[in-house]
Amino acid sequence: MPGPEGRPPRYFIWCPSNGRVEAPIQRRLRWRVHLEAICEDVAEALGCRQAPEMLVPGRVWSLGRSGDPRFPRNILLARGLSWPDAARVVGASRKIRVANPPILLTIGRLPPTDFWGNAMPAIVPLEAVTDLVDKEFRVDLAAAEAMVAGHELDARARKPRAKTTRRATRAADIDKLTQALRDHLRAARDHAWTAIKANKEPELLPRPSQKQLALQLGLTPSAVSRCLNDETAIELRTLWTAATDIEQTKRYRL
């Protein structure tokens, strides 16, 4: 807002505890992510043989094929898949919806599983496999490999069969539990940052117990336990562990 006569403008931020609070202009500065640099670093870490190519401006990039046998498909990177125009963006990139879906590294929240129809790519959330170590960008190849392998197993389980199999039922239960833990982590993250912005020590929201999840989702406690012990439920098991760690909770982005 304009300052008193002869003085510079004043700037304010919104505080959940104190309402409008005056703040110096420096606190309103924002970092701008260099997406092309991220693509180049990820492509190099995965052993891709070509320079990244932008398929949809600012949204989808092709990283090409990797020389690493653990990543046998085309590799793409995309952002904004939960945004309102996501269907149009995916449709504009013919390399995503193909007969042999690619490995798709994602930035930001994921769309629902039925968004992909019968051609779901191997989803690898970028934040789950990358980190900054001593100011150096690192990619956890073992974690990425595990997610791709998990997708392959899930894809086989999702193939149409004459009758609903036990594996298909568990895959559906895993999807329900994964979504419930995503919702919990988002709430826990917001709770922690509200405390931090109020200059308070962040507290971890209690993770729901297996019994509570069973009641919430209409499952049996034994079904919840089997899902959490399923080796193919990579994201579910990762979220289950992250929900007990305040630092991972604060960094959660999906």
Image (cartoon, rainbow, N blue to C red):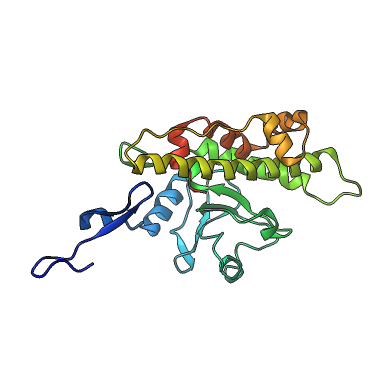
The answer to whether 220 appears left or right of 84 in the picture is: right
The answer to whether 47 appears left or right of 158 in the picture is: left
Q: How many marks?
A: 0
Q: Where is 2 relative to 212, above or below?
A: below
The quadrant in which residue 201 appears is top left
The quadrant in which residue 14 appears is bottom left
Which is nearer the eye, 233 or 109? 109
* Residue for point 10% across, 70% down: 5
Q: Which residue sits furthest right?
A: 162
x and y, in percent, of residue 154 in the image: 72, 44
* Residue for point 49% across, 47% down: 126
x and y, in percent, of residue 233 in the image: 66, 37
* Residue for point 44% across, 65% down: 58
Q: Which residue sits furthest left?
A: 6
x and y, in percent, of residue 199 in the image: 32, 38
| Quarter the N terminus occupies | bottom left
* Residue for point 43% across, 39% down: 192
Q: Where is 158 relative to 94, above or below?
A: above
Which is nearer the eye, 121 or 202? 202
x and y, in percent, of residue 181 in the image: 60, 40
Which is nearer the eye, 157 or 176? 176
Residue 187 visible at all:
yes
